[in-house]
Image (spheres, rainbow, N blue to C red):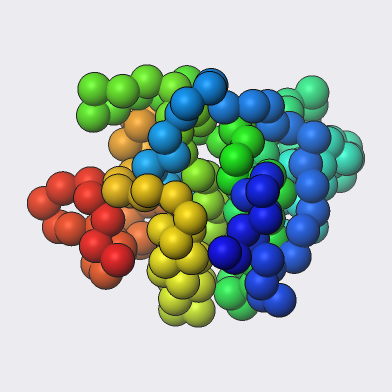
Amino acid sequence: MWFDDDGWLKHDWVQRQPSPNYDTRPLGTRIDTVVVHCISLPERGRSRQFIEDLFLNRLDTSAHPSFAELQGLHVSSHFLIDRDGSVVQFVGCENRAWHAGVSSGFGRTNFNHFSVGIELLGDVYSPFEVTQIQRLKQLIVELKKSYPLRYAAAHSEIAPGRKTDPGPFFDWKGIRKSTTYELDL
């Protein structure tokens, strides 16, 4: 098994940065969905440092004018995939990361309960790097070894009107079936 008991991935290509922004999943929850996000701080930025700082509750909100709206925000994701394909894990998969927010879709609500959140460093205005998508696919394959993953959703699909990520440059080919939300890996 590539995961420890708390759902931390044990691979040399994954760095651990434990976030305090998580809680326990409801008892008996079946983790069957991946939610794909993208994030850049500031908008269109390409450094992961501000993102790590946000997920670790140490973001200096005076460092950029757009950060003021993030004051007091407590969010996290299970994983962040950088532009070079490197991966940081913030929350063990057995726990509930705070990535989806108010969410519903496909006859379900509160996607934080039963999903793994994966952030891609990037924005909705430009393409993602090939290495990021390759690493995303590799990560999903590893997750499927320990979890009964069946579905993949965009953040925008479970929070329409509120979120737009991962945006029009994200290609689902090879990740999910073209006519459904079912994984194709």
Above/below status of 90 relative to 76: below
The answer to whether residue 123 is left or right of residue 181 is right
Q: Residue at x 47, y 26 (%)?
A: 28
Q: Nearer the viewer, residue 16 or 31?
A: 31
Residue 5 image position (x, y, % from top left): 66, 48
Residue 121 image position (x, y, % from top left): 59, 60
Q: Nearer the viewer, residue 83 or 45?
A: 83
Work out whether residue 154 can be spotted: no
Q: Quadrant of the N terminus?
A: bottom right
Residue 109 image position (x, y, % from top left): 37, 20
Residue 139 image position (x, y, % from top left): 50, 65
Count every numbered label the image shows and give the total: 0
Q: Residue at x 35, y 61 (%)?
A: 169
Above/below status of 167 relative to 141: above
The answer to whether residue 14 is left or right of residue 104 is right
Q: Nearer the viewer, residue 156 or 63?
A: 156
Q: Nearer the viewer, residue 147 or 91?
A: 147
Q: Quadrant of the C terminus?
A: bottom left
Q: Residue at x 11, y 51 (%)?
A: 179
Q: Quadrant of residue 2?
A: bottom right
The answer to whether residue 28 is left or right of residue 68 is left
Q: Residue at x 53, y 22 (%)?
A: 27
Work out whether residue 178 can be spotted: yes
The answer to whether residue 103 is left or right of residue 107 is right
